[in-house]
């Protein structure tokens, strides 16, 4: 039990659709990062939220967006899904200034 | 693009042997270098991390060796066990973000035979 819970665990969407993935962090974890992990590759940083504001973004287009809520939960939204968006999406959270982010088990998204 | 290059892609070691995984980074702004362990169906879990002010850090059977001038670092797993069989990722990032915004390597699939 890592204390970071992601839902759903698996999801199948059609190209062009929109998807929302959810993450519930440990109480007090005010910083959350989202990563995309394609099959057989390392995770790639999408963006980070700190105190409900985006606080850094990787090389991902604007159709990837997020929200962070006061109850330490967060969302990743992806619009206009493409086949290449098929991947494991991971969220990781920590206390601000803490070291060693805790990852959830991820949501496996398949776009067909 | 700032990359972290990891090798080998896969590694098979006998129980009790030493597993060695190597990484090289490009971005000199990186000053936090963690190693993550990932089992199938799970998210990565932090194993051990180092900052460039030290050349080596040991925690139990796991040791990171760091060479700042060569921009390389490696993970050594001593007395490897079948339970260590997993995918290992090195990463680099700015320390001021405390381990977020990491750039990961491609991963090494380690198999420890009994």
Image (cartoon, coloured by chain):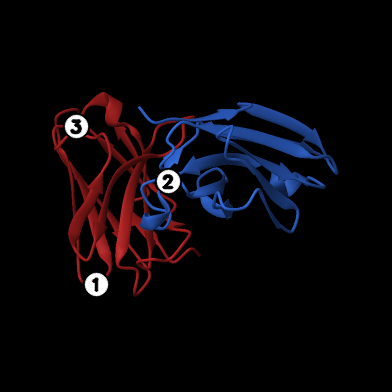
Q: Nearer the viewer, mark 1 or mark 2?
A: 2
Are labels 2 and 3 assigned to the same chain? no
Label 2 neighbourhood size at 10 Å, few (<14), some (14-19), many (20+)? many
State whether residue B77 is above or below residue B95: above
Mark 3 vs mark 1: in front = 1
Of B5 and B71, nearer the camera is B71
Alpha carbon of mark 2 to alpha carbon of mark 3: how far?
29 Å
From the rendered image, report the letter of the chain displayed in red: A
Residue A111 quadrant: top left
User: Measured from the top left, where is residue B98 in percent x and y?
Assistant: 41, 58
Which chain wears blue?
B
Left or right? Give the position of A5 relative to B31. Answer: left
Tag 3 residue: A81
SS under mark 1: loop
In the picture, the disc for residue A2 is none
Q: Mark 3 vs mark 1: same chain?
A: yes
Residue B39: x percent and y percent?
Answer: 57, 45
Chain letter behind tag 1: A
Q: Which of the 4 image quadrants contains residue B103?
A: top left
Q: Residue at x 53, y 49 (%)?
A: B34
Mark 3 packing: few (<14 Cα in 10 Å), some, or many (20+)?
Answer: many
**Residue topped by disc 2:** B93
CA–CA distance between discs 1 and 2? Answer: 27 Å
Answer with the quarter of the image where residue B28 lies.
top left
Horizontal side of A55 relative to B8 (left or right) equals left
Residue at image point 44% right, 66% down: A3
Q: Earlier in the sequence, mark 3 or mark 1?
A: 1
| Measured Cα–Cα span from mark 3 to mark 1 | 28 Å
Q: Which residue is mark 1?
A: A71
């Amino acid at each position: 039990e890592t204390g970071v819970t992601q839902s759903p665990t698996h999801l199948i969407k059609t190209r062009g659709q929109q998807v929302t993935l959810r993450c519930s962090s440990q109480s007090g974890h005010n910083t959350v990062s989202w990563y995309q992990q394609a099959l057989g590759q390392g995770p790639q940083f999408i963006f980070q939220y700190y105190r409900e504001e985006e606080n850094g973004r990787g090389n991902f287009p604007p159709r990837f967006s997020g929200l962070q809520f006061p109850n330490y939960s967060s969302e990743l939204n992806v619009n206009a899904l493409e086949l290449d968006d098929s991947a494991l999406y991971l969220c990781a959270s920590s206390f601000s200034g803490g070291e060693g982010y805790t990852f959830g088990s991820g949501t496996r998204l398949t776009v067909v | 693009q700032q990359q972290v290059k990891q090798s080998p892609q896969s590694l098979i070691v006998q129980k009790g042997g030493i597993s060695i995984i190597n990484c090289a980074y490009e971005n000199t702004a990186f000053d936090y270098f963690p190693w993550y362990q990932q089992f199938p169906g799970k998210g990565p879990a932090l194993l051990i991390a180092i900052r460039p002010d030290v050349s080596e850090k040991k925690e139990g059977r796991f040791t990171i060796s760091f060479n700042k001038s060569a921009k390389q670092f490696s993970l050594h797993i001593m007395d490897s066990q079948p339970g260590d069989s997993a995918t290992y990722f090195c990463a680099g990032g700015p320390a001021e973000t405390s381990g977020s915004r990491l750039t990961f390597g491609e991963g090494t699939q380690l198999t420890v035979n009994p």
